[in-house]
Image: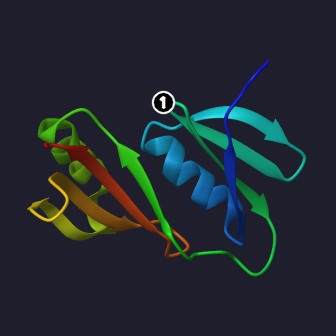
Amino acid sequence: MDHGGIVFFRSEAFDETVAFYRDLGCGTWREQPDCTILDFDGFRFGFCERSPAETEGILTLVVPDRDAVDEYAERLGDAVVEGPRFNETYGIYQVFARDPEGRTVEVQCFES
């Protein structure tokens, strides 16, 4: 039996949004009639075709090191809104981007 949790978001650009996260390396955990649940190393989140789109919050993908953050920054390309940098306050190296519906996506690694 699976344990854990899932965060769901309403999506008006469902296909484009799911493709965006799949292109980042998120796997499909489960397909449902109008929802797709994705998985990133145990972090599960889903998008459902609904209106209006939910775009609040930050979807943070945690990776092992700076090289991985930099690789994701390259993959994200034009979606990047704040390039890779060290955040002294939290002891993390991070990059910020926007998904097709404007949700904030962060890729980070912990360094302290």
Q: Quadrant of residue 88?
A: bottom left
Q: In screen coordinates, is 111 left or right of 21?
A: left
Name the kind of residue labelled 1 in the image. Asp
Q: Quadrant of the N terminus?
A: top right
Farthest top residue?
A: 1
Q: Is residue 12 above or below residue 73?
A: below
Determine crowd level at label 1: few under 14, some 14-19, many 20+ residues with C-alpha closer than 10 A: few
Residue located beneath label 1 in the image: 41
What residue is shown at x 50% (from left), y 53% (from top)? Answer: 20
Farthest bottom residue?
A: 52
Question: How many circles with numbers are drawn on the protein?
Answer: 1
Q: In screen coordinates, is 69 left or right of 56?
A: left
Element under disc 1: loop
Farthest right residue?
A: 33
Q: In screen coordinates, is 57 left or right of 53?
A: left
Give x and y (percent) for residue 89. 15, 65
Give x and y (percent) for residue 8. 71, 57
Which of the colour schemes (rainbow, by chain, secondary structure, one colour) is used?
A: rainbow
What residue is shown at x 72% (from left), y 72% (from top)? Answer: 12
Q: Quadrant of the C terminus?
A: top left
Q: Quadrant of residue 16?
A: bottom right
What residue is shown at x 21% (from left), y 44% (from top)? Answer: 110
Question: As rendered, which of 47 and 87 lies closer to the eye?
Answer: 87
What residue is shown at x 14% (from left), y 53% (from top)? Answer: 91
Give x and y (percent) for residue 93. 16, 52
Give x and y (percent) for residue 35. 80, 51
Q: Is residue 9 above or below residue 107?
A: below
Question: As rendered, which of 36 and 87 lies closer to the eye?
Answer: 87
